[in-house]
Amino acid sequence: MSRIAYVNGRYVPHREATVSIDDRGYQFADGVYEVIAVTNGRLVDEGGHLDRLDRSLSELSIAWPMSRRAMQLVMREVIRRNGVTNGIIYLQLTRGVARRDHPFPVGVAPSLVMTARRAKPIPASNLTKGVGVVTFADQRWARCDIKSTSLLPNILGKQAARQAGAYEGWMVDNNGFVTEGTSTNAWIVTDKGELITRNVSHAILNGITRLAVIQLAGDNGLKLVERPFTVAEAKAAREAFTSSTTNPIQPVVAIDGAPVGDGKPGRIALELRRAYEAATAQGGVNG
Ligand SMILES: Cc1ncc(COP(=O)(O)O)c(C=O)c1O
């Protein structure tokens, strides 16, 4: 089945899909995005993703290009036309097309692009053996809570991690505390069995999977503390893991080459992953 993209009101073959070179997304990264998982044909935590999209748009004063209901219908049509049962849908909204000039253009409609694709299989060894992360300075701007398409520090960080043979890079603030991964939220489990993830602020993206893990932790009687943790504390932790839409809960077994706990995927991470998979088969944890 050939891929179909939605571009500003039209469904077009993916390879022929184009946007204007004057689109402010292209010129300034003046836009936001969402990635939503499709599992067994259902959108996972759709409500949470659309709420976050609404927040990102409003923080940047970009209008919705259509009603939320209409957007949901287009999303379903994009998934249907691409024959995606298990995969993702990608939504990108920008301030629109205008002559290149920094101030917001007046009377310009926002641009909306959607694509969908089937899931890339996650290597089995990710779960059986776990993965490593490396740490480096967080070089991003001061509003990482906005899911902006401006991802230069994130892609540079991910590339550096991959070149170091690691799955992910954990970014570290000026005070030595881990903010988050380049495309994931960061978690540890302390010696006392407490689940720790950084509290929400302008320093991190409030992951929808993060919110789901918080909910599942509560449902499973785990003690959760939302607070910053240092790299040293993470290295001394019993377990570590990452969370994200595309790989919900990924055990981390090494940080900067040093083993975490016994160097094997942690029990709590694997339990949370199983609980997450059970919930997403029903459409997700936070609707
Ligand atoms: C910087 C960053 N943090 C966290 C996440 C995880 O968010 P979510 O669980 O909504 O996929 C992402 C996902 O793209 C991200 O880019």
Image: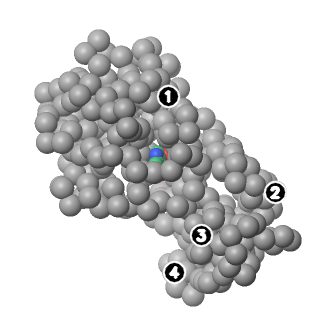
Q: Nearer the viewer, mark 3 or mark 2?
A: 3
Residue 161 place in picture, x, y as percent: 26, 54
User: Horizontal placement of 44 versus 239: left or right?
Assistant: right
Q: Which residue is mark 4?
A: 2
Query: Disc 1 to disc 3, how far (Cα)?
Result: 29 Å
User: Horizontal placement of 232 versus 138: left or right?
Assistant: left
Query: Disc 4 to disc 2, how far (Cα)?
Result: 28 Å
Q: Is mark 4 within 8 Å of ligand 1?
A: no
Q: Earlier in the sequence, mark 3 or mark 4?
A: 4
Q: Is the Cβ of the residue at disc 1 closer than 8 Å to that at disc 3?
A: no
Q: Is residue 281 visible?
A: no
Query: Label 1: few (<14), some or many (≥20) within 10 Å?
Result: some
Q: Earlier in the sequence, mark 4 or mark 2?
A: 4
**Is the C terminus in the top left, top right, bottom left or bottom right quadrant?**
top right
What kind of residue is marked 1? Asn
Q: Earlier in the sequence, mark 4 or mark 1?
A: 4
Helix, strand or loop at mark 4: loop
User: Horizontal placement of 287 versus 250: left or right?
Assistant: right
Q: Nearer the viewer, mark 4 or mark 2?
A: 2
Q: Nearer the viewer, mark 1 or mark 3?
A: 3
What kind of residue is marked 3? Phe
Mark seen at residue 28: 3
Helix, strand or loop at mark 1: loop
Mark seen at residue 199: 1
